[in-house]
């Protein structure tokens, strides 16, 4: 952490940032017009805009009339050309500096989002808004440190030599993070070397060690996703005796072999038998309830994303934190960073994000759902000409209405459907505030993985070939993201029709588990193999008639017998209990599926 400049004034800095938020939300529509005009004028000569005949126009009406609303598949050919080394201005007039790999997939591989150098400054700007907002609710945070568990993930190079990596890996490796100027709000317990260590075990171990050494200075704890923070607590449960020994002796465990990590930790670590005894006493307790406030007694809140599918982790976070506020500070994706939570101490169920109008050009596709089901939302892939022009401006959205987010970015995405469904919860001046409703079409998710119904069905079809020699079929199935285990794992409930007389041996069901895993997308497989953020897939065989019982239960709650369809994913606790009460046997995937960094089609080209 660099020294504070002599003229540094935190109060003045915070005031400037809050005034910026006030200004851009008051003038949201004018800012949006300026953003669109900037994007279109600087990219007037790119191939994509010429293809549709925009002819240098920068006004909204022509833009909406001429440019289609698109999904990733519509620009995949252009993306592949850039990835393969075409440096002509296809999507953007500025060079594509890297690809950000999305947790969403296309054809089983991570989507590649183009980005340009200046986007790092735009992301840094959004980060700079978070703590001045937070300081209005929790004063004094500049007096201590944040124990934020931050990790990089593997990266790959496209055949054309462009780096492809997740957005946070890109940010942590950039000078904006590594060489950040003095800011008391970015004073973390983890040295940069521990964050940038590619070995996930060494990174986690060293970051927790540094966090424990500085436990009295810690005022806030967090990770990006709730799932990652819980993994850290479980890691601590497993390895606290080693960590205590390091603190007692002032030495770093020999398992930490990265010399830069060891050197950075040794600048913090000093022999402290008293602290070691304290940690040992707390971690030896039979219950780990409240372990966060016990080990880090000055912690004011837990900073993690608990919206969307991450809400499934709220009960376990409450258990470990003794009910500390769970704070969701920002809304972002690989495509673009979007907005901030201006009321960060609200309940997780009430989190709303104010979209910052300078980040990109926003449009909103109205979503109308007659059945009220939000868990697996299907919207049409392509829009007709009338629908294309009916997208709503940022300032014109209606309170209570749901929309699919569509963005035009500085880095070359035009009227791009992000896939998130948002609901208007209120307004900050002229800028809307949105609840995150769901990710379009996602059925299962444990960490950053997103598995949709089509993908699950294809994986099921592949697995069922193992049952053919036994004259058996899966007559019905559903799935469940089980987060009671750490890491969480996918569970499939199968009801079988057995026509043959030969018993099916357990190894066949284990092969079915592995085949399903091999058939799922690369984000899931990376979570299993590299990140260890997802556990082995499980198949539970249920009694005959179980899915009839499931239908009876749904009808008893008011479902129409004519319209009832077996849900391909279940979340409602009584339904999960019903299924579990009828399980006859269960089987786990015997090993990890295959996974390598990068897209499979690059492997032989690099």
Image (cartoon, rainbow, N blue to C red):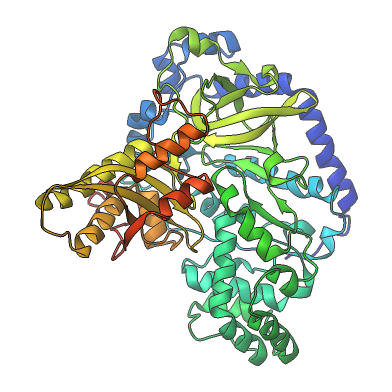
Q: Which residue is drawn at 55% across and 57% down?
A: 227
Task: Examine the rendering and report whether any part of residue 343 can be seen.
Answer: yes
Q: Where, by quadrant of the figure, is residue 360 drawn?
A: top right
Left or right of residue 165, residue 262 in this image: right
Residue 499: x %, y % from top left: 13, 47
Nearest to the observer: residue 199 or residue 304? 304
Nearest to the observer: residue 396 or residue 416? 396
Q: Where, by quadrant of the figure, is residue 403 drawn?
A: top right
The N terminus, quarter of image:
bottom right
Q: Residue at x 52, y 20 (%)?
A: 370
Left or right of residue 598, residue 486 in this image: right
Residue 284: x %, y % from top left: 64, 83
Tell me if residue 12 comes above or below residue 95 in the rendering.
below
Q: Residue at x 46, y 38 (%)?
A: 553
Residue 526: x %, y % from top left: 38, 56
The image shows a total of numbered marks equal to 0
Q: Where, by quadrant of the figure, is residue 34 drawn?
A: top right
Residue 455: x %, y % from top left: 33, 40
Tell me if residue 127 comes above or below residue 181 in the rendering.
above
Nearest to the observer: residue 19 or residue 588? 588
Task: Examine the rendering and report whether any part of residue 538 can be seen.
Answer: no
Tell me if residue 318 comes above or below residue 457 in the rendering.
below
Left or right of residue 483, residue 542 in this image: left
């Amino acid at each position: 952490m660099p020294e504070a400049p002599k003229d540094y004034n935190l109060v003045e800095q915070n005031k400037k940032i809050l005034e910026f938020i006030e200004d851009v939300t008051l003038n949201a529509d004018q800012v949006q017009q300026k953003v669109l005009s900037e994007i279109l004028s600087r990219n007037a000569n790119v191939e994509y805009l010429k293809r549709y005949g925009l002819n240098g126009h920068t006004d909204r009406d022509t833009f909406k009339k001429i440019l289609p609303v698109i999904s990733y598949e519509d620009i995949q050919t252009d993306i592949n050309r850039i990835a393969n080394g075409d440096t002509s201005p296809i999507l953007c007039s500025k060079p594509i500096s890297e690809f950000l790999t999305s947790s969403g997939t296309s054809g089983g591989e991570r989507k590649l989002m183009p980005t340009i150098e200046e986007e790092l400054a735009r992301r840094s700007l959004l980060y700079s808004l978070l703590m001045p907002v937070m300081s209005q609710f929790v004063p004094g945070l500049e007096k201590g440190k944040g124990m934020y568990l931050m990790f990089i993930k593997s990266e790959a190079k496209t055949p054309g030599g462009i780096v492809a990596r997740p957005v946070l890996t890109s940010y942590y490796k950039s000078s904006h993070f590594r060489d950040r100027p003095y800011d008391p709000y970015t004073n973390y317990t983890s040295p940069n070397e521990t964050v940038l260590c590619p070995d996930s075990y060494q990174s986690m171990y060293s970051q927790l060690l540094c966090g424990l050494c500085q436990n009295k200075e810690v005022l806030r704890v967090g990770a990006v996703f709730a799932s990652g923070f819980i993994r850290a607590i479980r890691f601590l449960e497993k390895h606290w005796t080693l960590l205590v020994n390091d603190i007692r002796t002032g030495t770093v465990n020999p398992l930490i072999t990265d010399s830069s990590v060891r050197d950075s930790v040794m600048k913090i670590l000093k022999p402290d038998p008293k602290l070691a005894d304290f940690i040992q006493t707390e971690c030896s307790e039979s219950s780990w309830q409240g372990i966060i406030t016990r080990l880090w007694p000055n912690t004011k809140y837990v900073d993690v994303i608990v919206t969307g599918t991450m809400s499934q982790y709220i009960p376990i976070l409450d258990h470990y934190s003794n009910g500390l506020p769970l704070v969701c500070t920002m809304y972002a994706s690989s495509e673009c960073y979007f907005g901030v939570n201006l009321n960060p101490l609200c309940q997780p169920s009430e989190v709303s994000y104010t979209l910052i109008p300078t980040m990109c050009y926003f449009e909103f596709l109205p979503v109308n759902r007659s059945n009220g089901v939000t868990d697996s939302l299907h919207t049409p892939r392509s829009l007709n000409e009338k629908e294309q022009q009916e997208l709503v401006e940022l300032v014109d959205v209606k309170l209570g209405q749901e929309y699919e987010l569509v963005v035009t970015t500085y880095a070359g995405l035009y009227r791009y459907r992000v896939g998130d469904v948002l609901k208007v919860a209120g307004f900050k001046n002229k800028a809307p505030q949105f609840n995150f409703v769901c990710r379009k079409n996602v059925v299962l998710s444990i960490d950053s993985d997103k598995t949709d119904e089509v993908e699950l069905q294809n994986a099921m079809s592949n697995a069922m070939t193992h049952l053919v020699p036994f004259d058996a079929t899966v007559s019905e199935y559903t799935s469940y993201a089980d987060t009671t285990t750490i890491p969480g794992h996918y569970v499939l409930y199968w009801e079988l029709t057995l026509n043959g007389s030969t018993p099916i041996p357990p190894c066949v069901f284990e092969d079915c588990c592995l085949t399903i895993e091999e058939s799922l997308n690369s984000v899931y497989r990376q979570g299993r193999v590299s990140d260890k953020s997802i556990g082995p897939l499980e198949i539970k065989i249920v009694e005959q008639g179980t899915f009839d019982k499931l239908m009876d239960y749904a009808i008893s709650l008011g479902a129409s017998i004519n319209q009832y369809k077996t849900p391909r994913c279940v979340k409602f606790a009584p339904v999960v209990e019903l299924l579990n009460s009828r399980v006859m046997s269960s089987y786990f995937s015997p090993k990890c599926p295959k996974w390598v960094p990068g897209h499979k089609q690059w492997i032989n080209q690099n």
